[in-house]
Amino acid sequence: MATFTHQTPQTHFLSRLPLRAKPRHFSARVKMSLQESAPSLAVVGVTGAVGQEFLSVLSDRDFPYSSIKMLASKRSAGKRVAFDGHEYTVEELTADSFNGVDIALFSAGGSISKEFGPLAAEKGTIVVDNSSAFRMVDGVPLVIPEVNPEAMKGIKVGMGKGALIANPNCSTIICLMAVTPLHHHAKVKRMVVSTYQAASGAGAAAMEELVQQTREVLEGKPPTCNIFGQQYAFNLFSHNAPILDNGYNEEEMKLVKETRKIWNDTEVKVTATCIRVPVMRAHAESVNLQFENPLDEHVISISRLG
Amino acid sequence: MATFTHQTPQTHFLSRLPLRAKPRHFSARVKMSLQESAPSLAVVGVTGAVGQEFLSVLSDRDFPYSSIKMLASKRSAGKRVAFDGHEYTVEELTADSFNGVDIALFSAGGSISKEFGPLAAEKGTIVVDNSSAFRMVDGVPLVIPEVNPEAMKGIKVGMGKGALIANPNCSTIICLMAVTPLHHHAKVKRMVVSTYQAASGAGAAAMEELVQQTREVLEGKPPTCNIFGQQYAFNLFSHNAPILDNGYNEEEMKLVKETRKIWNDTEVKVTATCIRVPVMRAHAESVNLQFENPLDEHVISISRLG
């Protein structure tokens, strides 16, 4: 069985080359998300590509909150950020940032997560971390909410008890969102993944460089190569993660290890080839699956309806 | 085993966005390719992207020839084409074009091949056809010269006996160039291919449209979609070949069927996912292989040296 899975339709995002995704839907209803009884939030790395996505998703989903702190590095402190009809000033992330914060969404790189994540959790904050810092740490749930919510069942907001929750790598998430329902029906025994990864995964600066390089190449100029150290416009290359001793790059091994942790299955055979393609947003994957049991299409369609 | 194979280094071709590949090497030696005793040639579809590549390869390799006819549709007749230091006038392709022609290289689409290929072969011309018209026809050799030259062993130039020789699909060629040596050592039993296919495979007009669309998107304009009917700049999509009843597109099934014919192995399991990526030239592939016998790395390295 061969599957080609898109995270989101690319043409939607690319029609005018926005560096940020457009909101997924518009709503005329009154927003009820700012409520005194709701949890207090913090976004760490709010000026980055993922930080801005956090805000966009919180807003799109009317996520209830009583307050929200916009946190980033010293360099970005003082900047203004718009959210849900209000303007906020970005504050510098410090050891004191998490006092009274119920939920913190982290996406400021692994070293920031390692330094401030456990510190926030100790202060009673539930940390949802987008970096790879804690993904493979025993006892830290690695969660795709639609796939394995049970992994975080002991964690409750508003009990004053902090926790770390890790968010898998982007390639793992989109792969397992598509594959897990099939796995539950017929048990995957071997999975071969080839990715088509966009600039967005490398952050806002990489997206800007792709635009800049594309302009340069079209003008016959040598491309500026600050982020990847090579031409990305009209080109593709093996994912920029470090190459490991086994010949795979780190991005590829994340897909292997994270799948096994999320499925709680150390036996499943997974291999991946991760490639950057010159697309602004939205990763895509080609996934080939071999199953232990016959894949009964009738059962699957019933389960989709149910 | 996971392999990622490039047809040619892309940055080489893309540094200044040429619509034609640069010559592979330059030579200071005197060319001996124009010789009276050498075969007479014809290039059908000479104004297209592949036609131009034919000329480039003939020139790079000092292919010996006594004369060369530049053939194309009526629309292109009268155009001037430079080759090997001379200028030629493009002639309209007709039933009489092949009188006295020893070798004809065809790349003008399947319907032109079907109409004029057998006609040329009857007149004693050896036709090397780049289209899919005859690939799966019994008795027509499907040849990658580095892989299965024995398939055309009865065919000789200068005997006045015509023949049809089919050239496989581009994805099949680059895949089997990399995989066949491994197949000979350990026998491939299952092959999973995911492609990253450039604009060049769809011809010169597709490459021009990718440049045009990219400029338009960067300027915030809607992209011109004459070739693929959708946005290609900063996007990717399932290969534009027609979708078949089994859910695969035609390009994907070519890889399956052609591999079996070239390897003369009806048992080998092959599956492919073919994707167009916004790259000007040079296809790439991610290939996962399962072997019948253990893959002895020592044997392979000896064979490489031998």
Image (spheres, coloured by chain):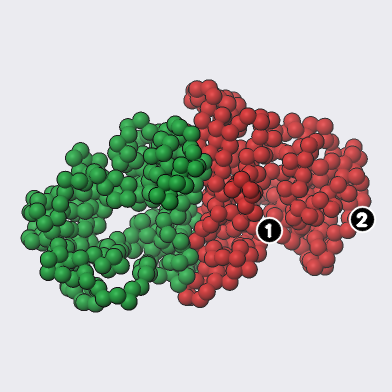
Chain colours: A green, B red
The three-letter amino acid code for the residue at tag 2 is Asp
Quadrant of res A87: bottom left
In this view, A255 is above or below A29: above
Residue B124, percent from left and from top: 90, 43
Residue A151 or residue B296, whichever sits in front: A151
Chain at numbered mark 1: B
- Chain letter of the residue beneath label 2 in the structure image: B
Q: Amino acid at mark 1?
A: Ala
Residue A160 in view (yes/no): yes
* In the foreground, B228 or B32: B228
Q: Quadrant of residue A202?
A: bottom left
Q: Residue at x 67, y 39 (%)?
A: B258
The reply, left or right, for residue A61 in relation to residue A161 is right
Q: What is the distance, in whole Å, between disc 1 and disc 2 at their CAs?
A: 24 Å
Eyeballing the image, is B151 above or below A88? Answer: above
Residue on which the image places disc 2:
B96
Q: From the viewer's perspective, is residue A91 above or below residue A106?
A: below
Question: Which residue is label 1 attached to?
Answer: B49
Tally of numbered discs? 2
